[in-house]
Image (spheres, grey):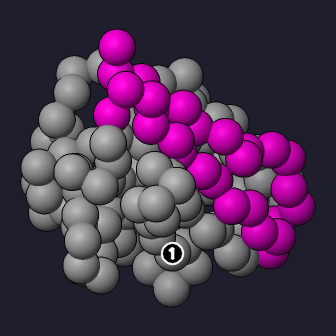
Amino acid sequence: HVQLAESGGGLVQAGGSLRLSCEGSGLTLSMYAMGWFRQAPGKEREFVASIERSVDSTYYADSVKGRFTISRDNAKNTVYLQMNSLKPEDTAVYYCAAGRTAYRLYLGATAFGSWGQGTQVTVSS
């Protein structure tokens, strides 16, 4: 049973920071490119960031470039999203996903059709 579990969300003031984690269960994350997506109320899910399997090649949405950093620790089977200088418009449920390549994730193509429960990030002004 493949499962991705997101954690680390919460309520933070604008300008603050959070670090999200994504742990794999029944899935060896080092075999996949990994990405983060988010969905705000009333909006479609959108790409945030992605990282290749074993090289430091990353993609970011323009809205988060310079503020968010995606990283991975394959030994811990975990992917992270460090979010700095948070803005109210970053408020959303954040999801992680596996993909064949970081670029395909950037285009919205995930390896599995299902999503985890996500983690809520709320940024107050």
**Quarter of the figure with the N terminus:** top left
Q: Residues within 10 Å of mark 1 (few under 14, many from 20)?
A: many
Judged left or right of residue 80, residue 58 is: left
The residue under label 1 is 69
Q: Which residues are magenta?
A: 1-27
Name the residue rendered at 64%, 68% in the picture: 83
Name the residue rendered at 22%, 22% in the picture: 113
Judged left or right of residue 106, residue 91 is: right
Q: Is residue 102 above or below residue 16?
A: above
Q: Position of residue 51 (x, y in %)?
A: 30, 66
The number of numbered discs placed on residues in the rendered structure image is: 1
**Quarter of the figure with the C terminus:** bottom right
Q: Secondary structure at mark 1?
A: strand
Quadrant of the rendered image containing residue 33: bottom left
**Identity of the residue furthest to the front in this view:** 75
Q: Position of residue 112 (x, y in %)?
A: 21, 27
Name the residue rendered at 29%, 75% in the picture: 58
Q: Is residue 38 visible?
A: no
Q: Is residue 90 visible?
A: yes
Q: Main secondary structure of the magenta part?
A: strand
Judged left or right of residue 49, residue 55 is: left
Residue 49 covered by magenta stretch: no
Name the residue rendered at 55%, 62% in the picture: 81
Q: Is residue 49 above or below residue 15?
A: above
Judged left or right of residue 85, residue 118 is: left
Q: Is residue 3 above or below residue 53?
A: above
In the depicted view, which residue is nearer to us: 53 or 103?
A: 53
Q: Position of residue 107 (x, y in %)?
A: 14, 53
In the depicted view, which residue is nearer to us: 14 or 98?
A: 98
Q: Position of residue 95 (x, y in %)?
A: 47, 38
Q: Is residue 4 above or below residue 64?
A: above
Label 1 amino acid? Thr
